[in-house]
Image (cartoon, grey):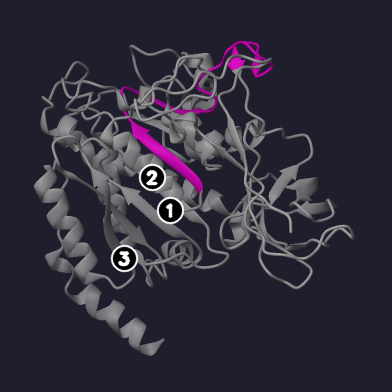
Amino acid sequence: MFVFALCLYLGKLVSSGVSLEFRYHNTVEVERYLRDVNNTFQFTHLHSIGKSVEGRDLWVLILGKNPSEHQMGIPEFKYVGNMHGNEVVGRVLLLQLIDHLTRGYLSDPLVTRLLNSTRVHILVSMNPDGFESSSRDCMYSQGRFNKNGIDLNRDFPDAFSKKESGMREMEVRAIMDWLKTESFVLSANLHGGAVVASYPYDNSNGGSELQSGSSVAPDNDVLIQLAKTYSYTHSKMHKGDHCYDSKDFKEGITNGYYWYPLPGGMQDYNYVWGQCLEITLELSCCKFPPESDLPGLWDANRAALLAYMQQVHLGVKGQVLDAEGNPLQNALVEVEGRQNLCPFRTDLHGEYYRLLLPGNYTFMVTFPGHQVLMETLTVPYGPDSFSALVHNFQLQRTAATTPGPSHPTQSCIPPQVWRPLDGHSPSLGPSGVTILLVLQVLWNTM
């Protein structure tokens, strides 16, 4: 521990060389800055999750006590910026957030507790090609789309759409693959052109989720809490009337579909198929504001960015184990009254995370060849202590089942993962509420 602390201290001594001005940095400058940070601070890890159409790396900086790999009980959190290349404030704020976190670790109590209890992933720019083609116009700059002219926030698989293409843009495929490598719990993607926190669902097909003009998700109460956490910690967002050319948003939040229907969005994809709760943060009236506005935008958002990260500790977390204490991968962990389109499952470590507000909840835990477990838990407010309630579920084998190797139950995957070689998705057809869910039974018995 002494050696680790000494390394961090020495890192701070040389951190003056890792300077960050309030201005727009191009892609080369961003990469250089991220490399400098990674080389300076022992608690960071830099890697690329893929490339853009023009071959630019999509760099992710990870910050935490153990940044290189997942640690049991430590939730995974992410911020994604610059999905639309001409919406640039999020890109600047995430660079400033990296600077704030690296300078504050072991000196700022909030930053220190956050990074000791959370593994934080920051993708500064999802659309570097779009950014490089942007012009500095407040609202009408080019650069929104990627090099192929595709809006990346309309290109994800959509659980409510009947028309699904098997082809995905490189940047979108990189995000989808990223979600397979990390068990993200909470996320936000940063945009511009309004000042509001928008939460799922963004789309609907007119089924039971459509209520009074909103598309209501099973975890609607949690999603509203997440959006309000950001809007009320932000200096102005909660007032709801910040932009002269935008509608008023009560309390600075909105259901995505209620604002406008959005098919193929990233936040719905994260929530439905990645079991990661994500909201969209619109952070400036101007998509490409003057550089002189950047310090004020950082001041307005700094506390909110940190407070939102802390919400990753809502609810309950733990493992699902068999009778011998072995972790069970792909066990279903369902909460009574919350019928998620894709049930939440344990990861390869048998871990689960469920973001929940304080209260009493009944859990149903299932795994093939094991007895169904029903258990009621009282969930406290975790963010204040930087930890969700820790609770392990232990399952017993059914008498008729011969013990054997564990196998996953079902894999709830987007239709694009299963597609013919010609690149076209199979036709699934509507049945009740149309959701394009492909369920694959993988478990075997001996």
Task: Give amino acid for label 1.
Answer: Thr
Q: Pointer 3 and pointer 2: residues touching (CB < 8 Å)?
A: no
Distance (Cα) linking label 1 and label 3:
18 Å
Q: Nearer the viewer, residue 376 or 155?
A: 155
Q: Is residue 228 left or right of residue 282?
A: right
Residue range (magenta): 185-214
Q: Quadrant of the N terminus?
A: bottom left
Q: Return the residue at label 2.
A: 177
Residue at point 56%, 59% (across, down) = 348
Does residue 442 show up?
Answer: yes
Spot occupied by residue 243 in the image (x, y as percentages of width and height): 35, 18
Q: Which of the marked residues, 1 or 3, is nearer the chain's N terminus?
A: 3
Mark 3 Cα-neighbour bin, 10 Å: few <14, some 14–19, many ≥20: many
Mark 1 Cα-neighbour bin, 10 Å: few <14, some 14–19, many ≥20: few
Mark 2 Cα-neighbour bin, 10 Å: few <14, some 14–19, many ≥20: few
Above or below residue 7? Residue 62 is above
Residue lying furthest bottom in this view? 2
Q: Return the residue at label 3.
A: 44
Task: Give amino acid for label 2.
Answer: Asp
Spot occupied by residue 233 in the image (x, y as percentages of width and height): 48, 41
Q: Which of the marked residues, 3 or 2, is nearer the chain's N terminus?
A: 3
Q: Return the residue at label 1.
A: 181
Q: Is residue 94 magenta?
A: no
Residue lying furthest front in this view? 446
- Determine the secondary structure under disc 3: strand
Task: Give amino acid for label 3.
Answer: Thr
Q: Nearer the viewer, mark 1 or mark 3?
A: 1
- Determine the secondary structure under disc 2: helix
